[in-house]
Amino acid sequence: MEQERLEQVFERIKNGDVRLVSRLIRNLEDKVPEAKEVIKYIYPYTGNAKVVGITGAPGAGKSTITDFLISSFRAQDKTVGVLAVDPTSPFTGGALLGDRVRMQNHAGDSGVFIRSLATRGALGGLSAAVEDAIHVLDVMGKDIIIVETVGTGQSEVDIMNNAHTILVVLTPGMGDDVQTIKAGIMEIADIFVINKGDQPGARKLYMDLMRALDMMQDLPGGWKPPIVKLESIAKPAEYANQVDSLKEKIEEHFRFLKDQKMWELREMRKARVQLINAIESQVLSPILELLQKDGEFDNMVQKIAEKEISPHEFAEQIRGKYLKI
Amino acid sequence: MSDRKLRIMVAKPGLDGHDRGARILARYFRDCGYEVIYTGCHQTPEQIVEAAIQEDVDLIGLSCLSGAHKELFPKVVKLLREKGAEDIVVIGGGIIPKQDFQYLYDQGIKEVFTPGTPLEEIKEWIDKNVKVEDRIL
Ligand SMILES: Nc1nc2c(ncn2[C@@H]2O[C@H](COP(=O)(O)OP(=O)(O)O)[C@@H](O)[C@H]2O)c(=O)[nH]1
Ligand SMILES: [Mg+2]
């Protein structure tokens, strides 16, 4: 793309051209080469937005909380971008993206931009498009970017590593007791949210979580993740108040990161994940694609399955061929 | 080396709250390998159009059982045009009498499917009529 057009696109993103921004995110997902060029061009202008990650089991209430958080931030005149990530079906490649159902009340508010993304199965950057979309919304001028993912695998942890502040949503009676909370998810939480706190088991969950947090040794900078309880959307006014206090905790965490000089550490964490993802998608995936194209990959799989040749030997050959080491 | 994937929004404008059919359709589209954005019941044309643009969908499938399709469907097309998003294809479904079809076509609804249409037929229509290749910036 020529310089002049890149400049135009950049200006249009900055001016909040919704059609262009959503098409750009689409093209990033679809891996259209010129979309990546835009990211390269705008990257130096990123870094103004604060990114909040929200993760937890399906049905925990992440989208509902996001909806209320949008209102809470909007009440302070902060603009909000939302990226709601849902899994792609590994069998069909399709995806059913339903997070918006809970967020449709912000239509007509140009201070809010909401986008659903599917994880798309490809190796090399499950989260790459999400990262790039964060950059785009950042340059678009959104003050707060909320990223919702279903907290399961490594890719979700990767996505969460792009956030400054991570919320982990738990609910009583969903097998979410502290013992079973996936290792890795527990550690990344900056704030715990107990949602549906009016339901049986909420108190026990709270106590268990407190105990687990008390035992946690390594609290970087001395931040002990607070637990915020949200009760029931059946009482919307109260629920909104509770989400307001959640928003205050999020802002407290932002301030803590800045005061403790930990903001830079988070930026380094983001940068590390983004670099690894970029290498995966630009170095590893093309090699895999090449191997798959001429059937070499399948031949290798066959030989490995028949115990003829070990995977290491093939990997060494591939390294010798493509990396010359 | 791009990797295009069709994005479809399934939306229910109007007041009726029966979204079973819409959900079945949404799930079927997912199983066809499309990315489906579902926005729930009681959507205004404004909400539908804003979501469709933010989601950069290629197609909006509107489902209406309440009988208000003659106002609601054309309104969606009109709003898309106003926002410069007339390249998003709109189709309709639900309980729609045959004599309304021509009016809806004239208003820019590209196809109308009634209950009982085999889902495969809808997929065939989509694959033939909705192109994603030229979605440039
Ligand atoms: N009782 C109760 N239900 C809730 C609460 N928050 C969300 N829900 C319901 O839980 C279901 C899943 O919510 P959703 O926000 O879509 O969850 P997500 O999958 O984590 O994004 C919906 O039916 C919500 O109405 C809550 O605080 N209390
Ligand atoms: Mg959700």
Image (cartoon, coloured by chain):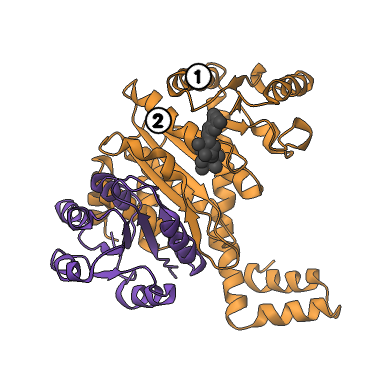
Chain for colour purple: B
Estimate how packed mark 1 is, as few (under 14), some (14 to 19) or many (20 or more) residues with alpha carbons within 10 Å.
some
Q: Tell me which residue sits at (34%, 69%) in the image.
A: B132
Q: Is residue A313 above or below residue A168?
A: below
Kindly tell me whether mark 1's CB lies below 8 Å from ligand 1. Answer: no
Q: Is residue A45 above or below residue A305?
A: above
Along the line of sight, the residue nearer the viewer: A272 or A133: A133
Helix, strand or loop at label 2? It is helix
Helix, strand or loop at label 1? It is helix
Chain for colour orange: A
Q: Kindly identify which numbered label has been placed on residue A70.
A: 2
Estimate how packed mark 2 is, as few (under 14), some (14 to 19) or many (20 or more) residues with alpha carbons within 10 Å.
many
Residue underneath mark 1: A242
Q: Is residue A196 above or below residue B124?
A: above
Question: On the rendered structure, is A6 left or right of A282?
Answer: left
User: Disc 1 sits on a residue from what chain?
Assistant: A
Q: What type is the residue that disc 1 sits on?
A: Gln
Sequence-first disc among 2 and 1: 2
Q: Tell me which residue sits at (63%, 83%) in the image.
A: A295
Question: On the rendered structure, is B45 left or right of B29?
Answer: left
Q: What type is the residue that disc 2 sits on?
A: Ile
User: Disc 2 sits on a residue from what chain?
Assistant: A
x, y percent for residue A57: 62, 41
